[in-house]
Amino acid sequence: MFNVKDLVIYGARGVCEIVDIIKKDFSEGKEKIYYVLRPVYDAKATIFVPIGNETLTSKMHQVLTTDEVYEMIKSIPKKDTIWIENENQRKETYRKILANGVREELIMLIKALYFHEENRKEDGKKLSISDERFMKSAEKILYDEFAIVLHMEPDEVLSFIKEYIQEN
């Protein structure tokens, strides 16, 4: 159970603050209890998550601690990548990874697409539009959380990660 003011990761929406827990009837004729989430980097959005809906509440995760973020960054060089040659299979796998928001899988996805992008650049090509979207979405989820925990701006996270890995 989460509480008001808790910061959570909510699937592909990234870091959200629980701003309220309310009882509401969304035209079903029956009141339910909802977490009211506000994405930290999109204050105009509001997300209602029914507390009794296991599928939706399972997408909510506690934000990492500072130590956990540093451990995760240290582990990046050792992580495998998730590259799938078949584009349709890759899209399906990457969609699931984004929806689940498992950080280790996000890192492996980002790393795979980063290396693929480097190889494409050597051939004078770019990432496909779908691969670019997957990479940006995964980076947003992960970097937003790291930024909150490390007290920095999301656009500072990548350079911080690169420097931290080089130093360690």
Image (cartoon, rainbow, N blue to C red):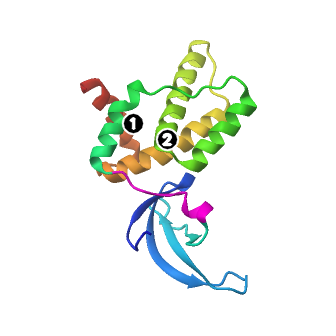
* Circle 2/circle 1 CB separation < 8 Å: yes
x, y percent for residue 145: 41, 50
- The correct choice, above or below, for 55 with respect to 12 in the image is below
Q: Residue 124 falls in which quadrant of the image?
A: top right
| Amino acid type, callout 1 | Leu
Q: Residue 96 falls in which quadrant of the image?
A: top right
Task: Look at 40% across and 43% down and name the residue there.
Answer: 155
Q: Residue 31 falls in which quadrant of the image?
A: bottom right
Task: Look at 38% across and 67% down and name the residue there.
Answer: 6
- Please give the residue where the numbered disc 1 appears in the rendered image: 158
Camera-nearest residue between 91 and 152: 91
- In the rendering, which numbered label is found on residue 139? 2
Q: Secondary structure beneath disc 2? A: helix
Task: Look at 48% across and 78% down and name the residue there.
Answer: 21
x, y percent for residue 80: 49, 25
x, y percent for residue 163: 30, 29
Mark 1 surroundings: few (<14), some (14-19) or many (≥20) residues within 10 A: some
Question: Which residues are drawn in magenta?
Answer: 54-64
x, y percent for residue 158: 39, 36
